Image: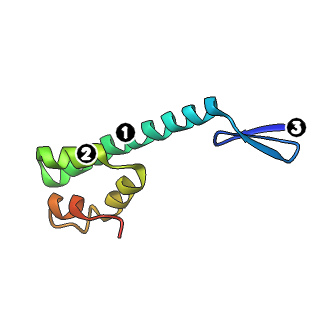
Amino acid sequence: MRRLWQGYIYSNNSVRRNPCLSAIGGHWRGEKASTGSRILTKQLRRRFDDLSDWAMTQLQKANTEQLEAWAEQIFDAPNVETLLGSSLD
């Protein structure tokens, strides 16, 4: 029996990388980050009004993990610079 999962093909206890599925998975992760960036941008505009070019650049460069961290911290941050200046530490 063959199963596909996260860019790998599992078949009879052997595992090998499937480049086509890996590319699709990478594309999906990119879309997920893009969607997260759009949602967080809307939330930030509602909380802090206009966003600077610097803030927009930070949001566009961020990966999904960073966007999720910022989304959790949005209500505690006094301003957008403090929020987006924070890392995953």
Label 3 element class: loop
Seen at 14% across and 54% down, the residue is 48
In which quarter of the view is residue 41 placed? top left
Mark 1: amino acid: Ser
Label 1 element class: helix
Q: Is residue 20 above or below residue 67?
A: above
Dot 3 corresponds to which residue? 1
Q: Picture coordinates of residue 85 (x, y %)?
A: 21, 62
Mark 2: amino acid: Thr
In which quarter of the view is residue 84 placed? bottom left
First reached walking from the N terminus: tag 2 or tag 1: 1
Q: CA distance from mark 3 to mark 2?
A: 44 Å
Q: Picture coordinates of residue 50 (x, y %)?
A: 11, 46
Q: With 34 as the anchor, is 42 left or right in this view?
A: left
Q: CA distance from mark 3 to mark 1?
A: 35 Å
Depth check: give the residue in front, 20 or 6. Answer: 20
Q: Are marks 3 and 2 in contact (CB under 8 Å)?
A: no
* Colour logic: rainbow
The 10 Å Cα crowd at callout 2, few under 14, some 14 to 19, many 20 or more, is many
Q: Picture coordinates of residue 18 (x, y %)?
A: 67, 34
Q: Is residue 45 visible?
A: no
The label on residue 41 is 2
Mark 3: amino acid: Met
The 10 Å Cα crowd at callout 1, few under 14, some 14 to 19, many 20 or more, is some
Q: Quadrant of the N terminus?
A: top right
Q: Is residue 89 visible?
A: yes
Q: With 44 as the anchor, is 25 left or right in this view?
A: right
First reached walking from the N terminus: tag 3 or tag 2: 3
Q: Nearer the viewer, mark 3 or mark 1?
A: 3
Q: CA distance from mark 2 to mark 1?
A: 10 Å
In which quarter of the view is residue 35 placed? top left
Dot 1 corresponds to which residue? 34
